[in-house]
Image (tube, rainbow, N blue to C red):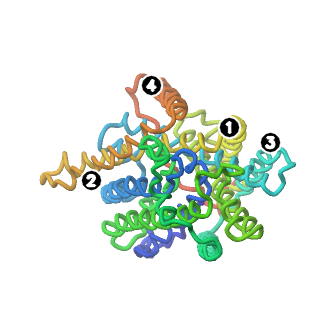
């Protein structure tokens, strides 16, 4: 979910260092969402042959290693916090460009998978309404909210996270009550979510883990708060690691409980919204509705924030003339938003929702994310081992292990995802070569520009619309 963090300004005009380690961890959990594994549960179960818990835990190891690299790179670049910057500065500008182009795919795909999931969830309430109607409805809702400049405050987002936590607590209580009435018949049922000898395969688990990474997407956002943190050299690293650990443990508990209630051998009514059916079995129709509404709100918030983030990225590229400035570099004067880009990203999400499944969309998003994670791990290896005067083994093994694990997960994405992602990369490389005359000029900047300040009576008028 897109979160706006309050900026406290000190008397000298800089950002006040007011955020503690606890604040950062709370921020990270809110950004990732405590309900993160619920939307992707069915897809994970199908891909991993029922080993969802195992995939979540393996993905947590990969993300913990990457989180360490992100936290360390945030020390070197406290005002940036972008894989694009880390890779471009430490390894090579062209490698940074490829990383940035991969990240751009994530920005463009996130609204699409949110629209797909919301449409499928809405069909559980109104199965007679065609999928296409809901896709158009959620496209209009997300795009309309962004065009009106509607933003959720940090306080509202914290409230939503608290509400989701209550729903999760009710879910665990419902599962305990369910098993008090339906006790397990054998102890092997309790270990089956971790390892089922009848269905286990390394390929299936690694394939599922490559999707499970989606559960952790967003932890890197903690590094963007470096200028507002008490003792950032220590707390950014710790908060990034602890956030991944907290989300990983919570997610594993959620999917473990879900797999006990609904064994993988039993097919789901709908794979994309499988978790809400688990909730319904655990506590009844009322809880089915509660969890569906909770995840709808979560995905609407996430999709709205992702659409605006993608629009801002395109605006930054338009402002620097990487894309046609007259269209992508324009700001709507009244609400100070990149209106053209919001509509463009919405239309891409709308079209994609008709041709891409939720599972494939999640894999495509992870295609770009895993490339960025590999790049950050390599950047940390180069900076803290190759270029360091003192060669510490931890600076050698941790980032390289993080790179290898992420690379292994990237290899286990589906063939379709790798093919489509590779086409995106080739298009990006061709675009970069054309824009820079064979990479002989400055490369495209993939940093998100700062948000436009809201216009007041003392600011300039519509003449400042185009930057």
Q: Secondary structure at mark 3?
A: helix
Q: Secondary structure at mark 4?
A: helix
Identify which residue, 125 or 5, lies in the foreground: 125
Which circle's residue, 1 or 2, is located before the other in the chain? 1
Q: Which residue is mark 1?
A: 352
Whether pointer 1 and pointer 2 mark residues with C-beta atoms closer than 8 Å, the reply is no
User: Quick one: which residue is furthest to the right in this view?
Assistant: 128
Q: Residue at x 60, y 51 (%)?
A: 265
Q: Which residue is mark 3?
A: 132
Place residue 408 in its image quadrant.
top left
Whether pointer 2 and pointer 4 mark residues with C-beta atoms closer than 8 Å, the reply is no
Which circle's residue, 3 or 1, is located before the other in the chain? 3
Q: Secondary structure at mark 1?
A: helix
Q: Which residue is mark 4?
A: 433
Q: Residues within 10 Å of mark 2 (few under 14, many from 20)?
A: some
Q: How far is the residue under mark 3 from the one under mark 2?
A: 46 Å
Q: Residue at x 35, y 46 (%)?
A: 405
Q: Which residue is mark 2?
A: 398
Identify which residue, 231 or 30, lies in the foreground: 30
Comparing labels 2 and 4, the label whose residue is closer to the camera = 2
Whether pointer 1 and pointer 4 mark residues with C-beta atoms closer than 8 Å, the reply is no
Q: How far is the residue under mark 1 from the one under mark 2?
A: 37 Å
Rendered image: mark on residue 300: none
Comparing labels 4 and 3, the label whose residue is closer to the camera = 3
Q: Residue at x 16, y 55 (%)?
A: 392
Where is 72 relative to 368, above or below? below
Q: Position of residue 177 (x, y in %)?
A: 63, 76
Q: Position of residue 137 (x, y in %)?
A: 80, 49
Q: How far is the residue under mark 4 from the one under mark 3?
A: 38 Å
């Amino acid at each position: 979910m897109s979160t706006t963090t309050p900026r406290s300004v000190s008397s000298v005009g800089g950002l006040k260092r007011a955020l503690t380690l606890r604040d950062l961890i709370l921020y990270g959990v809110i950004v990732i969402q405590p309900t993160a594994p619920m939307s992707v549960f069915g897809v994970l179960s199908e891909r991993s042959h029922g080993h969802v818990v195992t995939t979540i835990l393996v993905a947590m190891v990969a993300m913990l290693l990457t989180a360490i690299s992100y936290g360390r790179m945030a020390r070197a670049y406290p005002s940036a916090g972008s894989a694009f910057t880390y890779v471009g500065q430490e390894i090579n500008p062209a490698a940074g460009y490829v990383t940035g182009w991969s990240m751009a795919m994530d920005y463009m795909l996130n609204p699409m998978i949110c629209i797909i999931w919301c449409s499928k969830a809405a069909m559980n309430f109104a199965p007679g309404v065609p999928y296409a109607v809901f896709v158009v409805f959620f496209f209009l809702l997300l795009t309309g909210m962004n065009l009106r400049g509607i933003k959720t405050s940090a306080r509202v987002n914290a409230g939503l996270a608290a509400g989701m936590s209550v729903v999760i607590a009710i879910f665990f209580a419902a599962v305990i009550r369910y098993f008090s009435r339906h006790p397990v018949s054998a102890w092997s049922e309790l270990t089956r979510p971790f390892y089922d000898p009848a269905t286990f395969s390394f390929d299936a688990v690694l394939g599922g883990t490559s999707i499970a990474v989606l559960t952790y997407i967003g932890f890197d956002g903690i590094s963007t708060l470096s200028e507002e943190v008490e003792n950032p050299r220590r707390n950014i690293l710790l908060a990034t690691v602890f956030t991944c650990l907290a989300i990983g443990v919570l997610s594993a508990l959620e999917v473990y409980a879900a797999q006990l209630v609904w064994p993988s051998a039993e097919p789901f009514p709908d794979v994309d919204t499988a978790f809400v059916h688990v909730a319904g079995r655990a506590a009844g129709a009322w809880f089915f509705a509660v969890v569906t509404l909770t995840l709808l709100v979560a995905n609407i918030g996430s999709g709205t924030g992702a659409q605006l983030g993608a629009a801002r990225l395109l605006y930054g590229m338009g402002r620097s003339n990487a894309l046609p400035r007259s269209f992508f570099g324009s700001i709507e004067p009244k609400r100070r938003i990149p209106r053209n880009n919001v509509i463009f990203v919405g239309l891409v999400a709308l079209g994609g929702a008709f041709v891409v499944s939720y599972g494939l969309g999640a894999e495509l998003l992870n295609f770009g994310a895993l490339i960025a994670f590999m790049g950050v791990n390599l950047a940390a290896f180069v900076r803290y081992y190759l270029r360091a005067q003192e060669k510490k083994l931890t600076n050698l093994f941790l980032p390289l292990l993080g790179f290898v694990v992420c690379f292994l997960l990237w290899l286990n994405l589906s063939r379709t995802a790798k093919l489509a992602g590779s086409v995106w990369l080739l298009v990006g490389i061709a675009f970069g070569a054309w824009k820079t005359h064979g990479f002989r000029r400055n490369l495209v900047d993939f940093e998100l520009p700062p948000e436009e300040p809201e216009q007041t009576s003392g600011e300039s008028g519509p003449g400042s619309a185009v930057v």
